[in-house]
Image (cartoon, rainbow, N blue to C red):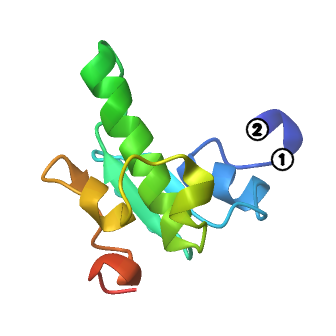
Amino acid sequence: MAGVGREPSTAGVAESYEFADAFVLDSEDGTELNRPVVRTDTKIDEPADAERVARACALALAAVGAPAADLGLAVDDPADLDGEDIDTSDLSAFGGER
């Protein structure tokens, strides 16, 4: 990131990807962005971890208007993907503050 004049941080990545409407960040990353953010443990060691991160991605996409049918979800309402292992408090579509 520094090589292209950007801050080597989450904020720097977000600044570089202005076209990204939402982000999935690790639950330990306290970076505040001016876009919807879903937070979860992003470490993937086993299939259950991958499933959790995939749910977080689907929630972020749904929050910015992606239709559930286009996401290939096994649920009709993306809110059904939310759980204690995912923080959607930044998403107004799921009862958050934004």
Q: Nearer the viewer, residue 65 or 24?
A: 65
Residue type of the residue flagged with mark 2: Ala
Please give the label number shown on residue 35: none
Q: Which residue is drawn at 29% across and 25% down?
A: 49
Circle 1 — which element? loop
Location of residue 98 with respect to 57 vertically, above or below: below
Please give the label number shown on residue 2: 2
Give the CA distance from mark 1 to mark 2: 5 Å
Place of residue 11 in the rendered image (x, y in percent of width and height, measured from the top left): 58, 57
Per the image, the residue denoted by label 1 is 5
- In-image side of 2 versus 66 (left or right): right
Q: Nearer the viewer, residue 75 or 1?
A: 75
Place of residue 40 in the rendered image (x, y in percent of width and height, measured from the top left): 30, 45
Within-10-Å neighbours for mark 2: few <14, some 14–19, many 20+:
few
Tell me if residue 83 can be seen: yes
Location of residue 97 with respect to 80 vertically, above or below: below
Q: Which residue is drawn at 26% across and 83% down?
A: 95
Tell me if residue 43 can be seen: no
- In-image side of 61 versus 43 (left or right): right
Q: In which quadrant of the rendered image does the N terminus lie?
A: top right
